[in-house]
Structure formats: structure tokens, C-alpha cells
Image (cartoon, rainbow, N blue to C red):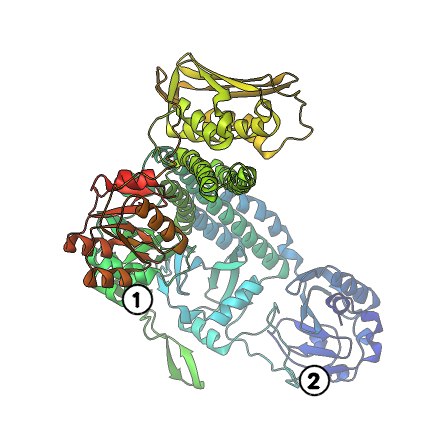
Amino acid sequence: MSDQNQFQVDLTNCDREPIHQLGAIQQFGFLLAVTPDWIVKHASQNLSDFLGVEPEEVIGGRLPEIFTEAAILQLRNSLHNLKTADSIQCVRSARLSDKAGEYDVAVHRSGDSIIIEAEPADESASHRIAQIRSMADAIKSCDTIESASAAAADELRDYLQFDRVMVYRFNPDGHGAVIAESRRDDLESYLGLNYPASDIPKQARELYRRNLLRIISDVNASPVPISPALSPEGEPLDLSLSLLRSVSPIHIEYLKNIGVGASLSISILQDGKLWGLFACHHMSAKVLPQNVRTGAELFGELFSAVLAQRTADLQRAHSQKARAIHTTLMQQFAGETSLANNFKDVSRHFQQVISHDGAAAVIGDDTTTIGETPPREDFCKLARFLNTAAPARVFSTDRLGEAYEPAREYAATASGVLALPVSREPRDYIILFRKELVRMVNWAGDPAKPAELGPNGARLTPRKSFELWREEVRGQSMPWTESELDAADAMRITLLEVVLRLTEAARQDREKAEQQQTFLIAELNHRVRNILNLIKGLVNQSRGQTASVEAFADIVGARIESLAMAHDQITKENWSPASVYKLIETEAAAYLSEKKMRVRLSGPDAMLHPEAFTTMALVFHELITNSAKHGALSDRKGEVLVALEEKSGGLAINWRERNGPKVKKPTRRGFGSTIIERSVPYDLKGDASIIYEPDGVKASFSVPENYVACFASPSSKPLQRRIKSKLGDVMKGRALIIEDNVIVAMEAESILTQLGADDVKLVSNVKAALDALDNHQFDYAILDINLGDESGLDIARKLVEKGVPFIFTTGYGEDTLAADGYPDAPVASKPYNAESIAEALSKL
């Protein structure tokens, strides 16, 4: 049956179901448990004391024979308001029987049953409910949790007229402490005392979380057992949410041991978790009417709300500080290259929201420390321990020695650790340390002996000694607060962003960096496809231009070498200012062949910084290839005029096409057009425009002066044709070629033969090369530094040992060659050609 149906049992139809059980609770009320199948009645004394019905008349009786129709209607209506499994609904001053007075009734669910509890109404205390408003105002005016707790204890004691009211707060490990107290003057103070977790075990704390109010009116009352103890299904009745139930005899003994005659506890919840209790004690028996208890429960909920607000205020203040620090750090590291170099400032910013005694930055194999920290040699082991924690969470402990045994050796300086992972692989950390806080803790009795075997048989009885017990606590630091942990998580995210910036050497924000990366990947794909298609076109267009295979190979080879040189323009300048003239001429030579002379340059040459040079290389590549496909350079007479001009320190570029075929504005904008129109404004904050006029495309660009290194007179020369004939006997003797690709190795062999080598031996790996050097004599060698998964450096050392001169070859460009220990070795870049090989060999 669904929950809704269970809550909506029609009590008026229960006359067919007999009363099945009779039992007892506290001696001032009674309880009914109603299900669709059976009815259970519990009473503390003869029902005649309440309803004028004898207990023996109830067994086998029917509900309408006990309650009036009006009472049954009230109870049925209250069932509709039970919204959750732990809801309790109250009916005030209900007349249940014509033979008895008025009752306050509470209704709630227990498993498959509906529990109905009743106690005589007491209208004499109804006026006290109005006191709750002034009590709420008193705690709302407090600025801190401590002051609000003290005010709440005073207000609640005055409202309940109890001898003592305490605010009892639970710690994360389960033990509790009295943080506020209001008491009768002649009573001993419990303020500041700590109580072990066993005093309120886990299962009891769960009941406190579910049922906000628990009352014991008289610790000396004798409960009446339920009879029979089990339902027809063989299950005991769950009275977890009952307001009038008796309590554990162990708890009764506990209260007697501290001289309490009656008690009331009101749960204090935060985010659905048990934060603490109002623990209310009276030295003699005391019955609280239901409306007074309801007022106390309402006050408890109001205090929980005030507590939540004060906690939120603290967290908001920490969050505001964390956001301010985030902004400061992002500004500070915008142009920095090392977190370690600025770690002192980082620690100082952290100190504003998270107090600590020492800090360390563990970045890769480097460790930077400030303040009191463990010995440096222990950081590597500590980092390995931290790596066992969740990778994307802050790790914190105020008892490092308990979680990590070696830390006991340096507990004095590092009992508390707060570790912020700022990367995933490898795991880097910012670690904050707190030193040991040796302190005395006041316990209500010896916490190491919370219970002893006693008169209840093989069960535990409460402690009987509550004398002040002082314990010296070592190996612990000041705990990390929730606000500090929230701030640490916010700072972790900030540092992740900082580290990403530093790692990528990016001075732009992350969003722009991601956009730029996507843009460059798309452009790389675009260019590679263009180059592959262009090579295929070169081969096809060169076919039939010459009758000899050798001449055909020279033509195709020369054009492919021109393409390679154009590609190198983006990478080979190695981030130094480069010439715009040379950039345009290189692109023209690569993609226009004999049409390159129809690109005419005028005006001063400009040397652009790498950022602008790379951007303009993309722009001119698109302009030239588009012109060759569709514009002035697509026929036999069109030409392109490129005028450079200095304007306010910046560079103005005007592109004009003329004498070509008629131009039509494209119907769609492709990726190339997007690069032309958006690259300069987006990357350089300059201007760009392109106009498709019938007589030729016109484009203009402006590059801001901060990207222009200088202007100079044009000094570039027309690109020379690559050699087409053998260079003669440049290098005689026996040569060794170490190259892992057979086609490339054969090409190098052919070139060396042209240059005059008498004999050439080819090897593809380190072992074969070392064997060849041990068994043969060579006059010189060509060594590819990257041999698949192997490095050629071992071969280089062997060549030096044997006295064989050599050159390096690489496909990465000579400026990126990582040949440690051989900075002066000649380098020839791939693809191989006779001229570059001869130039490198001539330096030996």
C-alpha cells in the first residue's frame, strides 16, 4: 500500500477491527496504533482515569465504542497533513469521549501504523506560547554563535521554568561539549565540560535527528510494558517518534547519577544533520503540557534558523575574502612565470582566510617552504601519502600523526595539514601546516571509562563519576573550520587556474586560450589538407613538362622544397622579429611558382614580433592561395600589389588585385575568409577589411605598433632556384647514414653520392650504428637525432670517441634540436636537399 493510502486510513470504518493489544508508556497519557488490518491500544493506567472505559472492555472492542464521531473526524483530518514519514500533527483540546475531558492529541506514522497519542489538555499554560516571539528577538539580535547560544539558554530556561538549560554541541568525532549554560545559582556549572561520544551513542543521535523533542517527565516513574509485546505479524511497535514513550533504563540511570528528576531535549539541526541539543534538566519531576513543549520545539527550530544564518554570514565573509584573493592572484600572476618565485605572496594571501604556521608548494620535484614546516627530506614521502587521497578534493586533518604514522616525528611543527591539489598528473600541492596545540580538555568524568558492567546483567551502565577530569591532549592542532575548508576549496580552484596559466605560458584568460587553441587546431588541419592537395596538384601539373624522369624529379623536388620553406616561416624564426617582405615572398614562392613575380611589394619593410608574424602568415597564406584559385593570379596577366606603410608607429597593409578575371562576391564565407577578416582584430586588436570589387579584391589591415619591432628599407632578394645539377666532388670518402626511415635514408644516400661520397652505409637504429662504428672506418656521418623511440645521442658520443665528424639532421628545425652537449654540431633540416647537406658538411 502506498504511503498516501497509509496516511489516509478511514478511522470511521475501524469498527470491524478489534482492539488487539494493551500496553503502557509514561504515566500521564495513552497511545493507539492504527493500521488497515488491526488496532493496538496502549494505556498507562486504567482507561477509566482518562476515558471512563475499563481496560478489559477495550480488548476485543471497537474504536467507535471508545471515541466520539467528532473525535474520529478530527483525527482523520489530521492524517492529511502528514507530509513525510517523520511528520507529527497535533490536535488541541479534542473531546475524545463523552465521559471524559479534553485531550491534546499527536498523530504520526510508525511503519505500517498510524500512532495516536493523547494526554489531558492544560489550558493554563496556553498564554506562554506568545513568549516565543520575544525569545526569538533576543537571539536574533546576537552577532555570534556563542552569544546566540548563551541568550537561547537563558530564554529557554525562563520559558520552561527548568533548573538548568545547556547548549550542547557535537564535535565531528561524536563527543560533545557544553558551550552555553543557564542554571539555578546553587547548581554546579557544566559549562565547558566535554562528554565522550558513548554518552549519546550513534543510534541515539539518529533518533534526536528524526524526533526534535524528547521528554522524560519523571525519572522515577514505573513504565507499563506493552502486552502482548509483538503485533500479529510478530514485530514490536516502533516508538521512535513517540512523544510519550518511556526511555532506556540506562538513560534513566544516567540521569539519576547526575541528580536529574525530569529532562527535555530539543534537537538543533544544520543542513539536516544533528549540530547539537538544548539539554534541559529539572531536579524533580515536571510534566510539561503539550502546548508548552510545542513552543519549546518551535524555539529550537528558530534557533536552528538563526544558527544557519550566522554560519552563512561567516561563510559569506570568507567567500568574499576568497573572491578578492582570487582576483588579486589572477592579476598578480598574469605576467609571471613561476609560482615558486611568488609563493611568499601566495602564503600571505592564504593567511587572510586560513590561519597557518607554515606553508609549502610541492610542484613536481621542487619544494618551496615558508614558516614552520616538516623537514624538507620528508616532503616526498608526505606527498606520496597525500596522493592516496581523492585527487580533486582538499585533504585536511588536525591529527596528521594518526592518519600518517611517520608524521609523529614532526608533530610539534605539523600536527595539522590542509593540502590543496593544484594538478592531477603529476599531483602538485599547496600544503598549509598548523603546529601542535598542547591543551587541557575538561571532561565530565574519565572519558576512557564511559561505562562499567553493572546490575543490568551483561549490559553497560552509565558512568557514576562526573568529577572534573582533565586530560592533556597532544598530537593535535587547532581544527580546520568549515568556513576555512570552503575557502580552501575556492583557493584550490584559483590556484588550478594559476598553474594552468603558468604551465601554458599564457597571458590571456583561460577562455581565450581555449578558443585560440581550437582556432589553431582547425587551421593546422586546414593547412595540412591544403599542402597534401597542393603536392598532388604539383605532381599532376608537372607531368608532361619534360621528357626525362630526372628533369621531372628536379621540377617536382624544387617545388616541394619551396613548400617546405614556406612552412618553415611560421616556426623557423624562433620567436624573434621577422620580415614582412620575406614572409610574403616565401608564401608566393611556395604557392605561386613562376607567378610569384606578379606579387609586387612597395613601401618600407616591417619587422613583426612573433605573435603578429604568426597571425599575418596565416592571413597572407589565405590571400595568396585564394588569389591563385579565384583571383588575379588565377589567369596569365593578373597581378597583386601589396603596399606597406608606417602609420602612428603601426603597420598599414593594403592588398590590391588587378587585371585578373571578374570578381564575384562569394555566396558563403569559408574558413579562409574567416581567418582573413577576424585574425587581426581578434589576435592583435587591429583592423581588417576585405572588399570584393569586380575589377579585383581589395583588402586592408592595420597592425598596432606594439607588434612592430621596427621599419627598415627592403633588403630581401628574390628567392634563388634550388640547385638542379650535381654539386661535384664536395665530400669524398666513406659515409655513414643513421636514419630510421628507409625512403629518407635512400634520398640522403643519393645526395651524398652526388656530393662525391665513395661509399655510403645505411643503418636504422642505435645498435646497428654502434656495431658499424666498431667494425668499420668512416670519414663522416649523417645522424638523425630522433630514431623512432630511440635517441641518437649515444651514437653521437661513439662518433666523438672514434673521431668521426658528423652532422645532425632533424625534422623539427635546428633551433629545436635537443642535442645536449653538442651545441656546435652542424644541423641540416628535413626535407633533405643537396644544398643544405653540402652546407652542413662544409662546416665540419
Circle 2 residue: 233
Q: Neighbour class for label 2 at 10 Å: few (<14), some, many (≥20)?
A: few
| 262 with respect to 581 (left or right) | right
Q: Quadrant of residue 198?
A: bottom left
Label 2 to label 1: alpha-carbon separation: 48 Å
Q: Is tag 2's residue or tag 1's residue first in the polypeptide sequence?
A: 2
* Relative image position of residue 656 (x, y in whole percent): 55, 17
* Relative image position of residue 594 (x, y in whole percent): 49, 27
Q: Neighbour class for label 1 at 10 Å: few (<14), some, many (≥20)?
A: some
Image vertical order of residue 543 relative to residue 99, above or below:
above
Tell me the residue at 45%/66% (across/down). 283
Q: Which mark is residue 615?
A: none
* Relative image position of residue 165 (x, y in whole percent): 46, 58
Circle 1 residue: 402
Amino acid type shown at disc 1: Glu
Q: Quadrant of residue 463?
A: bottom left
Residue found at the far bottom of this picture:
457
Q: For the C terminus, which image quadrant?
A: top left
Foreground: 22 or 320? 320
Image vertical order of residue 627 relative to residue 290, above or below:
above
